Image: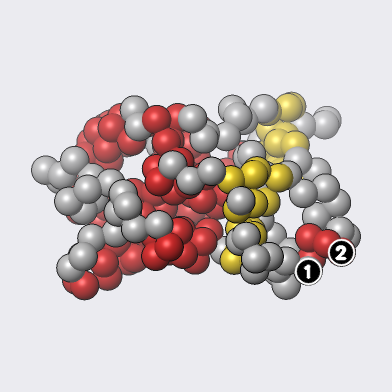
């Protein structure tokens, strides 16, 4: 049986959990303890991060995008990538925007308001307005593009795909938590969020709600 090393709150792990759920793949989910110092876990990945997928023969696959493409190659039904090469490229570009650009921009907004330490989130006593505005300005460029791409579409391609999965964490969790005005400014994305949240694979694998604590005086 496959093993997935993951953390429940990680957006990258959520991507892997959604793909496994969409394909109905049985697996053992493991939360690693002492990840940074656990020699057994560090043997699985040189970068020491989750998610890590361990195959039946002990081979490890790490990085969420690569894990999901491996799952698509090994378990092609139901498909999470189109057949057309241009559509495949489009799916990968959208996922890259989600991971490499949109998520970091939203993280700037998050860190302008909150501090993350030792698995806990603390509300800052004052917001770093400049950092927040910079993050939102960066995020808006990608949200504008994605909203155009979503216009008239149920999903970003002809079917629910790895492109959609890549966007689930930043758009259905982070953006909503930060009160990004999707319905007012990016209505196509807001409608897309409603559709993906209705999918069992998304709801059943979702991280727990954020728990916010007031910052120390």
Mark 2 crowd level (few <14, some 14–19, many ≥20, 10 Å Cα): few
Q: Is residue 98 left or right of residue 121?
A: left
Residue extending farthest left: 152
Tell me which residue sits at (41%, 52%) in the image: 166
What colour scheme governs how the chains and residues are painted in the rendered image of this protein?
secondary structure
| Residue 138 is at least partly visible in this image | no
Mark 1, Cα crowd under 10 Å, few <14 / some 14-19 / many 20+, is few
Q: Position of residue 182 (x, y in %)?
A: 32, 36
User: Which residue is found at the position 88% from the left and 60% from the top?
Assistant: 37
Between the C-alphas of marks 1 and 2, the distance is 6 Å
* Above or below, 165 relative to 58: above
Horizontal relation, residue 180 to residue 50: left or right: left
Percent coordinates x, y for residue 121 in the rendering: 71, 36
- Helix, strand or loop for disc 2: helix
- SS assignment at label 1: loop
Point 40% across, 57% down: residue = 75
Residue 201: horizontal and vertical position, in percent? 42, 36
Please say if 91 is above or below 131: below
Q: Quadrant of residue 187?
A: top left
Q: Quadrant of residue 141?
A: bottom left
Residue 39 marker? 2
């Amino acid at each position: 049986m496959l093993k997935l090393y993951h953390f429940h709150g990680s957006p990258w792990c959520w991507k892997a959990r959604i793909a496994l759920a969409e394909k109905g793949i049985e697996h053992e989910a493991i939360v690693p303890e002492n990840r940074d110092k656990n020699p057994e876990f560090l043997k699985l990945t040189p970068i020491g991060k989750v998610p890590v997928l361990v195959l039946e023969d002990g081979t490890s696959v790490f990085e969420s995008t690569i894990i999901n493409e491996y799952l698509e190659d090994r378990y092609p039904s139901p498909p999470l990538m189109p057949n057309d090469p241009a559509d495949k490229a489009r799916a990968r570009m959208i996922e890259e925007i989600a991971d490499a650009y949109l998520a970091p921009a939203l993280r700037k907004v998050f860190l302008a308001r909150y501090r993350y330490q030792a698995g806990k989130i603390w509300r800052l006593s004052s917001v770093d307005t400049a950092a927040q505005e910079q993050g939102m300005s960066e995020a808006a460029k990608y949200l504008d593009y994605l909203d155009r791409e979503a216009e008239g579409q149920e999903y970003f391609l002809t079917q629910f795909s790895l492109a959609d999965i890549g966007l689930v964490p930043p758009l259905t969790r982070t953006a909503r938590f930060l009160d990004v005005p999707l319905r007012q400014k990016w209505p196509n994305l807001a409608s897309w969020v409603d559709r993906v949240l209705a999918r069992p694979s998304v709801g059943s694998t979702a991280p727990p709600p954020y728990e916010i604590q007031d910052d120390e005086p």
